[in-house]
Amino acid sequence: MTDLPIRPDLRGATPYGAPQLDVAVRLNTNENSYPLPAGLVADIAAAVGAAAAGLNRYPDREAASLRADLAGYLGLGLTVDQVWAANGSNEVIQQLLQAFGGPGRSALGFTPTYSMHPIISAGTGTVFVDGRREADFALTAAHVVDQIRRHRPDVVFLCSPNNPTGTALGRDVVAAAYDATEGMVIVDEAYAEFARPGTPSALGLLPGRLRLVVTRTMSKAFGMAGLRLGYLAADPAVVDAVRLVRLPYHLSTLTQVTARVALAHAPALLETVAAVMAQRDRIVAALPSYGLISVPSDANFVLFGGIPDATVLWQALLDRGVLVRDVGLPGWLRVTAGTEPETSAFLAALGRTTAG
Ligand SMILES: *Cc1c(COP(=O)(O)O)cnc(C)c1O
């Protein structure tokens, strides 16, 4: 690659690379461990079969029916013109940065946060500014406003609940960030469905805030990471701006059809959310008995710490058939809350490693 005439700003960069290893217990990418319900699988097969004959035609470029269904799922009176969908929220974020970031512009995030925010920034030629969190990984309104005033970014990323810490933000933080910038504010709510009661979504802040965007995904709570369907809610003007940069027909007919069937099954699909949250809380409750600490989590994973050497523990767990995530924070690892047997396997492996 070094021999290629690659863009100078991409030289030396590394691609996103969570290990995809063939291990019994995979708790490293925050997927939903539960397989899809049989009834949904059958309905998807039928709908895809019916759509197959029409694949000689391009898909609905506007994905209008799917966006209407997504608006209906979000509720709050949101309408089709306020919702946009793409191949994963990563593509939604890329389109947002193509429209609102780019060469000569900057995006501010609050590290440690989702590793794709800087990678998508780099890919779109947007300078990513590494903002800071407090020692406990929280973010106060004053802290956020101070950093926005200092860096004057064109785009502010707020990730709530935040990956990899699980930390959710109060609405006051989002509102204060919005008031402190003239740029776009993107609230990445990939884990919103796992938030504990009383943790509000930023969706309620959308009315009257032209530059506020909330991104969501079907990869986590819906258990459809393999589908690649992410979406945003914002002012219709934001959707119009994204249309300027999206590739024509970016969302395949099969994706649109499958996502619509899944949304029709939303209540059944989301039944696993409570079970996953119970496993998350079980992990949090169990960690102290292993001499470990954790960050309060509103997501489907737990960041745990107090680890003498995270790389060593990561490998020791892998040797015992449990794959967790080394997010590059010294002394910390992240584990996804999966099924009850998966949590038991994780805790058993942890017991054997910490016992030496
Ligand atoms: C997993 C995750 C996503 C999901 O991305 P998709 O492209 O929708 O699969 C988005 N944001 C964060 C913070 C995530 O952790």
Image (cartoon, rainbow, N blue to C red):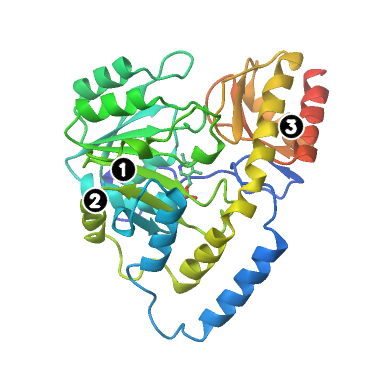
Please give the name of the residue rendered at 62% of the width and 49% of the height, measured from the top-left corner: 20
Instruction: Please give the residue where the numbered disc 3 appears in the rendered image.
Output: 317
Q: Position of residue 42 (x, y in %)?
A: 67, 70
**What amino acid is at disc 3?**
Leu
Q: Residue 313 — which label?
A: none
Q: Nearer the viewer, residue 16 or 77?
A: 77
Which element is circle 2 on?
helix
- Residue 290 in the figure: left or right of residue 47: right
**What amino acid is at disc 2?**
Val
Please give the name of the residue rendered at 51% of the width and 52% of the height, measured from the top-left corner: 218
Instruction: Please give the residue where the numbered disc 1 appears in the rendered image.
Output: 213
Q: Position of residue 311 (x, y in %)?
A: 63, 27
Please give the name of the residue rendered at 71% of the width and 50% of the height, measured from the top-left corner: 22
| Whether residue 62 is visible | yes
Q: Nearer the viewer, residue 111 or 236?
A: 236
**Crowding near the residue tagged with mark 3, few <14, some 14–19, many ≥20 C-alpha atoms within 10 Å:** many
**What amino acid is at disc 1?**
Val
Quick check: 193 above or below 238? above
| Whether residue 321 is visible | no
Query: Which label's residue is closer to the chain start, 1 or 2?
Result: 1
Q: CA distance from mark 1 to mark 2?
A: 8 Å
Instruction: Please give the residue where the numbered disc 2 appears in the rendered image.
Output: 238
